Amino acid sequence: MSQTDLHEILRQYWGYEEFRPKQEAVIRSLLAGRDVAVIMPTGGGKSLCYQVPAVVSGRTAVVISPLIALMADQAAHLARMGIPAAFLNSSLPRPEQQEIMRNACAGAYRLIYLSPERLVRNDTIGWLRNVPVDFFAIDEAHCISEWGHEFRPEYRQLKLLRQAFPDTPIAAFTASATRRVRHDILAQLALREPDKYISSFHRSNLRYIVRQTDSKTQPRMLLTALRAHRDQSIIVYAPTIARVEDTADWLTDRGIPAIPYHGQMDAATRQKNQERWMSDEVRVLVGTIAFGLGINKPSVRAVIHLSLPKSLEQYYQEAGRAGRDGLEADCLLLWQKKDAGLLAHFIQAVEDPAERQRSWDRYRIMRNFAESDVCRHRQICLHFGETPKWETCGMCDVCSADANWLNAKPAEFAQASVSVPAPAPAAVSSADPELFAYLREWRGKVAIRENVPAYVILHDTSIHDLCGKRPSSLEELVHVSGIGERKAERYGAEILAAIEAFKTGARAAARNESGPSPTEATLRLLREGRTFEEIAEVRGRRVTSIIDHVVKMIERGDIEFNPAWVLPERRAAIEGAAARLGFDRMKPIKEAVEEYITYDEIKLVLAGLRRRASLSGAGSQPSPESDQLVER
C-alpha cells in the first residue's frame, strides 16, 4: 500500500494528518507479515500501530489485553469511527459471546480483544482456527517476563500462539521494558527475526517533581497540587486501601470531590467510580495500583503518588498516565522515609528467593531516583537503556525552578502568583476557554447518553482544535484533528449546533461538585440509626474505614460516643485496660483483653475516652486534622 493510501486511511478513520514517529514503519512491517516488537512510551500511539493494519488487511487482528474495561473502551471507540470491533470475556452474557464468536468466524470484525486467560483456553484456540486471523497483537507485553515489574504467570502461556499458529505474525507492544525484559519478551513469544522498534523513553511533555515529605507537608502539597489543576482530571496513587479511602474522604471534606478505586470494592462500585471519572463527572480519582493498567484517558493533567512505587518501571508506567494527549502534565512523587518500611513488608512477603532479590534491586533503584539530584528524565532514559545526548531537560525539579509552586501553602493559593502547569502553547493559543468549557460540557452529556468515556466521543486536543478553527460546515469539520469522516457523520450536526449556540450566548453551567461531605453523609446516616455495616454499603466503603471516620469525628467533637456501639462487658474490659495502660496505643490494650474483642471496638472506646479526657483537661486535645491525613 502506498504512503498516500495509508495517510488517507489515517485521515478517514482517525482524523489525523500525520503519523507519529515509528507508527507508519510498524504498520508496514505488520502489513508485510513480519513479527514485530514495539517499545513505545505511554501516549506514543501503540494502539494505532495494530488498528490501522487490521483495517487495511480486511482480516481480523486478535489483540491480547489485560483489562476488561480497556477492551470495552477500545471496541466502543473503534465502533464510533466505523471500524467493526468486539471484545470477548466473561462480563458478556453467554448468548452474546456465542454471537460474537459466530460473527468472527464470518470475518465480521477487524479487531477482537481477548484476555490472556481467555486466549489460552483450548476451546478458544479451536475457535480461532476458524477465524480469518491476520496477526496477533500482545499488549502490555512486559507482563510476560519474570524480570518485569508486573509479571503475570498466565502471560507465559502465550508462547502457545507460535505453536498453534506457526504462520501467523505476532506483534508485542509495551511501554516500560528494560533491555533484559525486552530480550525475555522475544524469547517467550518465540518471535522470528522480528522487526524491532524502540522509541525514546523521554516523555518531554511530562514535568517530574519529587519531594520528600512528612505527615504534615504531604497533605499541604497534595492540596496545593490539586488546586493548581482546577477542573482537570487527576489520578492520586495511595499505597494501601485504607489510605485510598481516607484520602478520598479527606479531599472531599475540603471541597475537592474525589472517588476511591481499589481491589476490595465490589465490582459494580469499582466500575461505577471508574466511569464517573472517565466521563469527567468527578475529576479526582484516588486509587491503588489496581487502577491504571491500560487506562486510556488522554487528558489527565497530573498523576500524584503519595508513596514510593515498588520500581522505577512501575513509576514510569503510572506517571505516564498523565499527558497522553501530548500536552504538558505534572507527575508528582510525594514520598516519605517510612515508605521503605511498607515496601520492605511487601518484599519480605515474596516467597520465591530470586523474585525477592529482584524486588530489593528494584526498590534500591527507585529509592535512588527519589533521592538523587540528577535530571529525572535522564535517570529514566538511562534505566531503560537509552543514553540521551542532553544533560538537563528543563522539565523536572532538578533542572528547573518552575517546580517551586508546589511549596505554596493552599491558603495562599488564590492570591499567589503560582507557576501552574499549562497545556502546550501551540495546542491552545487560539482556544477560547469559555467555548472549550462549553464543548466539554456537551461532550460529557453525550458520553453519559451513550454510556462511554468522554474521550471516546472527542479528545481534549480535538476540542482545542475546534475552538481554534470553529468550523461551520461538515466539510470544515473533517479537517479538525481527531475527527474522521465517521465521527463527523455521527456527531457533526451536534458539534456545529453547539458552536452556533455558543455564538448566540450559550455558556457552560457552573460546575457544582460540592454535595454533602463524607462527614455530613456519615452523620446523617448515624442519626437515621444505621449500623456501621449499612453506612459502609451506602457510602461504598469498608466497615473499618467508616469506623475510623467515626473515631475521628468523636475526637473532634462532631459526635458523641454511643455506648450501644460496643457491648457493655467489652466496653468495660477495654476501659479497664486503658486505665492501667493508658490510651495512646491500641496494641498493648488488644493484648490485655480477650481475643474476641476487636481493634474496631477498641478504637471506638478509646476515642470516647480521649474526648472525655480532653474536655475535662485530664489529657491533651488530639491535634487538628485540617492539614493532616491519617497514616495507617
Image: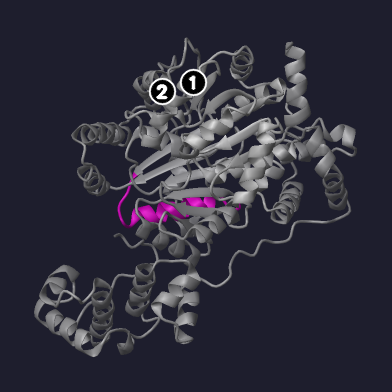
* Residue topped by disc 1: 200
Q: Is residue 121 left or right of residue 498?
A: left
Q: Residue at x 89, y 53 (%)?
A: 504
- State whether residue 598 is above or below residue 138: below
The x, y position of residue 450, in whole percent, is 72, 52
Q: Quadrant of the N terminus?
A: top right
Q: Is residue 453 left or right of residue 175?
A: right
Q: Specify the amino acid type for callout 1.
A: Ser
What is the number of the mark on residue 395?
none
SS type, badge 2: helix
What is the number of the mark on residue 381?
2
Q: Quadrant of residue 332?
A: top left
Circle nearer the N terminus (1, 2): 1
The x, y position of residue 322, in whole percent, is 52, 39
Q: Residue at x 39, y 22 (%)?
A: 188
Whether residues under marks 1 and 2 lie with C-beta atoms below 8 angstroms apart, the answer is yes
What count of labels does the image hold? 2
Q: Specify the amino acid type for callout 2.
A: Cys
SS type, badge 1: loop
- State whether residue 513 is above or below residue 370: below
The x, y position of residue 372, in whole percent, is 30, 31
